[in-house]
Each structure stands twice: as C-alpha cells, then as structure tokens.
Image (cartoon, rainbow, N blue to C red):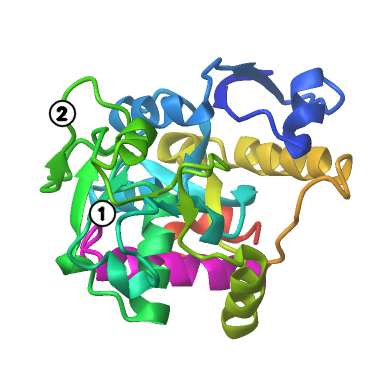
Amino acid sequence: MMKLRVLLGAHPHTAALKSGAVTSELVEFDFADYSPTNKGFKPMVREGAFDVSELAIVTFLMAKAYDKPMVLLPDVMMARFQHAFAVTHPNAGIATPKDLEGKRVGIRSFTTTTGAWLRGILANDYGVDLEKIDWVTFEDPHVAEYIDTTTKAPAGKQILPMLFDGELDAVLGEKTDDPRVKQLFPDVAAEEKAWFAGHSVVPVNHITVVSRDLSEKHPEIVREVHRMLQASRVLAVGKSPAFNDDELTRSIELITKYTAEQGLIPRAYAVDELYDDVTRALR
C-alpha cells in the first residue's frame, strides 16, 4: 500500500474518494486541507508538494514551460463557461467588450485560468486589443519564474471594493450579483450558448496532474489513481460534467492557444506533449 499526498477540491465527483467509498488495495490517499483549493496550487508548482494534485490548466501550462516535474492526467476537476465572470462599474462607459480598451481592469492574478479564458474570448471573438487595457493585479503568479509586468493594486486593497468605489472600471474573474456593478455581457446565457455553438468547447478550469517521479517509477500507481478518480465520478453521475477525450482535447487546445497568444507560455503545446507515455495511454 502506497500513501500519496493528494490535493483535490470538494467536488461531487471527488466525494466518494474523500468519504472512503472508493478504495484501493494499492493506494491510500492522504488529503491536504486547503480552502479554497487553489491555495494549494502554488506549493504544488513551486515545491512539488503533492503526488496527485488538482491544478488550474493555465498554471499547469506555465509549469510545463518551466519544466516543472509533473504530467497531465485526463481527469477534469472543474469546467464552466466564463462569460458571467466579467463585471463593470456602471459609470465607466463600458457598453461593449471593445470599450474595455483604455480602462483599468482588475484581475486577481494575470495568470488565472478564468482570466486567460476571458481575455482569449475578448480578443478572438470581440476584437478587443488586450494591450490597450491597464491590468491591475492583486496576487503573484503560482509559477515563480514568470515575470508579471501588470500594475499592482495598492497594498491592502481588495478587488471588488475597488470596483464598487470606481477605482477600477471592470473586473475579470469575479462573479457577483451586487447591484453596484453591471455584467459585461448583459445576457450571459445567450452569450454562452452562442459561444458554445461557435467553438464546441466547454472551458476547462482545473485538471489533475501527477508528479513525474511517480509516473516514471510507479506507473501502476498512476493507473490506479486514474481508476479511482473515474470510479468516484461514476458514483456522482448527474452531478458533474464528464469529458470524453475529444471534448477535453478541444478545450485544452483552445486554452493553450489563448495562453500562448497572451505570452504566458512560449508556444502552443500539442496536447500529446502534456502527457507522458503512462498517462497518454489513459485517454
């Protein structure tokens, strides 16, 4: 029995793993306690803190760029449409996405996956020139080697209060129904439907990775981890979306394209490059 250090969020499709309903004769999971889960992403990419980890897909792509020792598993932890995570100050003069140009736009970190998805959507589907936006950020990137050149928010400031007070014109990556703000996309459901019709992609936010060392030395353990993740998902049918390989590949290809366009990674990796021989066979 091998005990693994594991970071997984509290999702319907991980509940059976965390409750012990899915077990193994080969593997025992030692779950790390981070709330929210993304607080564990920095230790994973900077210290290799876990053997198995949920990870934001853009964080993983950037980790790949700096040869961090981890490989992709074809197990989605979280996916969602992004259009609802863009809000504006009602007096900022933002009637269309193009009006973001010349404005101060807050984002928790420039390297967040939701931010990368939204910037990709804004640039590719609405013609927004991302270089004409003054990006204001609040947190460091997960990957320490990345040099962030955005404007830093003043110490102690919080992102939504700055928007409420008019210190920011818009915010990406936050979802709120507060009456002091407006949605960038007034009919979010219609925008999401139209975007999916055009791209046939559900945006992946969080995936699963394993350490390169585990995959190279114990491939049977990696295969067992994947089996357990799939078994837990089966027990949660109807509570969370499942991706087949084609759907996952399309989503990863698109976010990799966006991430490269935004200069977060040096080039758009082929999806096969994100797996190794062990995990590629699990697709």
* Farthest front residue in view: 91
Instruction: Check residue 102 in the rendering and tell me which mark sits there, or answer none.
Output: none
Q: In the rendered view, does 139 fall on the left or right side of 118?
A: left
Q: Nearer the viewer, residue 175 or 46?
A: 175
The amino acid pointed to by label 1 is: Ala
Query: Callout 2: few (<14), some (14-19), or many (20+) C-alpha neighbours within 10 Å?
Result: few
What residue is at 70 percent from the left and 38 percent from the top? Answer: 224
Residue shown at 52% from the left, 44% from the top: 175
Could you say where residue 202 lies in the image, as x and y percent from the top left?
Answer: 62, 65
Residue 169 appears at what percent x and percent y? 29, 51
Residue type, mark 2 in image:
Pro
Closer-to-camera residue (235/177) = 177
Give the quadrant of the C terminus. Answer: bottom right
What is the quadrant of residue 161 in the picture? top left
Extreme residue toward the bottom, this view? 198
Dot 1: element: helix
- Residue located at (20% from left, 35% from top): 144
How far apart are the two marked residues, 1 and 2, measured between alpha carbons? 30 Å
Q: Quadrant of the N terminus?
A: top right
- The overriding secondary structure of the stretch rendered in magenta is helix
- Total labels: the figure holds 2
**What stretch of residues is rendered in magenta?**
247-269
Q: Secondary structure at mark 2?
A: loop
Residue 159 as seen in the image, left or right of residue 81: left
In the drawing, what numbered circle is on residue 65? Answer: 1
Could you say which is closer to the camera, residue 12 or residue 60?
12
Q: Is 254 colored magenta in this rendering?
A: yes
Residue ID for mark 2: 154
Judge whether residue 61 is colored magenta: no
Observer-nearest of 110 and 252: 110
Front tag of 1 and 2: 2
